[in-house]
Amino acid sequence: MRPSARDVVPRYPTPIAIGTGEILREGDRVALLGYGTGVAKALSAAEILAERGISATVADARFAKPIDAGLAAQLAAEHGVDGFLVQPGDVKEAARYAIEILSRPDRGREMGQTARLNAKKNFCSNDVIPAYENYYKRVLSES
């Protein structure tokens, strides 16, 4: 069933800046980013995942281009663990974190190593594809 415009188009009380997105639902295992009718599909997918015990964050990118790079990074990184997340244009906050990493090289190395491990675990096809294959095999064997 296709979602209707009423289900997809939000009613914003104030104008929104081009290139900014919004997190609609917080989760801690999976991030789903959509725009337009894809947002309703992402919310539906999050409900299905929740029924299976998988908590999903859903974000509305609002625009295909320009993408909200800060929002995309927020979905991929954990603040203070494998990087620092800063709102686009917040130069003072970005500078504060840059100084922290430069003044504590061990912290920067640790965060970089964590980010590499997380990226490999979450995005490397050699690891992700077998995980999906095993998941689908398990689901199919249960039905």
Image (cartoon, rainbow, N blue to C red):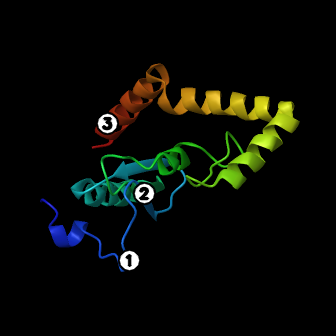
Instruction: Give the camera-side residue of 16 and 22.
Output: 16
- The amino acid at mark 3 is Ser
The residue labelled by disc 3 is 141
The residue labelled by disc 1 is 14
Would residue 63 be found to the left or right of residue 118 on screen? left
The residue labelled by disc 2 is 20
Frontmost of labels 2 and 3 is 2
For marks 1 and 2, the one nearer the N-term is 1
Report x, y in % for residue 22: 44, 61
Would residue 110 be found to the left or right of residue 34 on screen? right
Name the disc covering residue 92, or none.
Answer: none
Frontmost of labels 3 and 1 is 1
- The amino acid at mark 2 is Thr
For marks 3 and 1, the one nearer the N-term is 1
| Residue 136 found in image quarter | top left
For marks 3 and 1, give the CA distance: 50 Å
| Label 3 crowd (10 A; few <14 / some 14-19 / many >=20) | few
Look at the picture and state if 142 lies above or below 18.
Answer: above
- Could you say whether the residue bearing mark 2 is in a helix, strand or loop? loop
Residue that protrudes farthest toward the left in the picture: 1
